[in-house]
Image: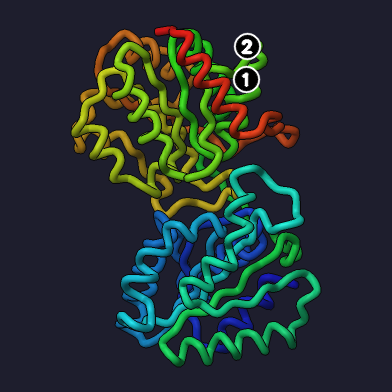
Amino acid sequence: MRASTFLQEVKKIGIRTVAGVPDSTLKPFCDAVCHDGGKEFQHYVTANEGAAVGLATGVYLAQRRPCLIYLQNSGLGNLINPLASIANQEVYGIPMLFVIGWRGEPGTPDEPQHVFQGRITCALLEVMDVPYAVIDAATTKEQLGELLAAAKTAMEGSRQYAIIVRKGTFEKEADFVWSNGYELVREQALKILIKKVYQESFLVSTTGKISRELYEQCDVLYGNHDRLFMTVGGMGHASMIAYGMAQADASKRIVCVDGDGAVLMHMGALAALARQQPENLLHIVINNAAHESVGAIPTGYSGQTYTSIAKACGYPSAALVKTEQELETALEDAMQKRALSMIEVMVSLDSRADLGRPKERAAENKLQFMRACAEGGK
């Protein structure tokens, strides 16, 4: 199915606004939305999926038009509260159409963080009283028209409707290609980081390619990745995991390696960290202005930096770097301090085509990491 065809069918039921968080399963759909350039739809990449529900609520109140919200099924966790307490038919009754990428579908091999979420996706929608349909590559235009007619009926009744999209449903059309203008390659920046901090710190990394690159480079440089905890799911929560560790053991230096999209998703963590001032926590933000791991779609905050926000929240130190030398200097300075620090690293949209994935199960990584923590270290 062509994503552009899908969007044209969606337009027929009165939707003119599209909002959400990019997903790799939905990449052709996201590319099509971005290529549209606002000619057919107003498009917003929101900080998280719950924010998209809020935006859709506002649009409906002003225009009486429902919105389309797209997301990976892992984003249902961010969606549930505003859906249940605002949009539900028994509260304000705000109609909206969800397009959900189905990661971890039962019977389909996927990464460990998606397995449980994939199994409960349909059940969550049933509990939330959201009727749904599943589409795949075999879904015809006529069948799509029928299910969108069902969606329109549900929305006219002040309800929501979900379309669950299986992997491979949308055929590839034109990729949305852009450049953020930065030259430092992320994997090289992470290599510098590991050389400077790995042997005297414990790392907590965010979901996506950042963790995968750290995993490989730790193995290349030191022959192990025992001091690396990869937060393979729960986007936006790595910094609070790192804070929990820093507070629980003040003798250890904790380094959180975050992504700009992840920070944006739960930015309140910056205020919480600044309020608590964990002296043994170094917060690294790798900023390429995009959700690069799921298709390189720009974030809703693309082109902006986080250091000024960190300083405004109360971080004692926040440095912005764009070159290898600036990064090395900033790391040396931060590691000498005993204060909460942020280093924001501006990187290009580049990653290796042959980038691997962790070989261990998530639970095995946890045990290796906890064993390394128990054995000591700075």
In the shown orientation, is residue 169 left or right of residue 21? right
Element type at mark 1: helix
Q: Position of residue 276 (x, y in %)?
A: 21, 30
How crowded is the residue under tag 1: few (<14 C-alpha within 10 Å), some, or many (20+)?
A: many
Q: Find disc 2 in the rendering and name its residue.
A: 221
Seen at 39% across and 20% down, the residue is: 254
Residue 154 vs residue 144, the one in the foreground? 154
Q: Position of residue 351 (x, y in %)?
A: 64, 35
Q: Name the image colouring.
A: rainbow
Seen at 55% across and 53% down, the residue is: 297
Residue 356 vs residue 43, the one in the foreground? 356
Is 301 rendered above or below residue 230? below
Q: Find disc 1 in the rendering and name its residue.
A: 217
**Given the image, on which type of amino acid does mark 1 rest?**
Gln
Residues marked 1 and 2 touching at CB (< 8 Å): yes
How crowded is the residue under tag 2: few (<14 C-alpha within 10 Å), some, or many (20+)?
A: few
Seen at 62% across and 20% down, the residue is: 217
Seen at 62% across and 57% down, the residue is: 118
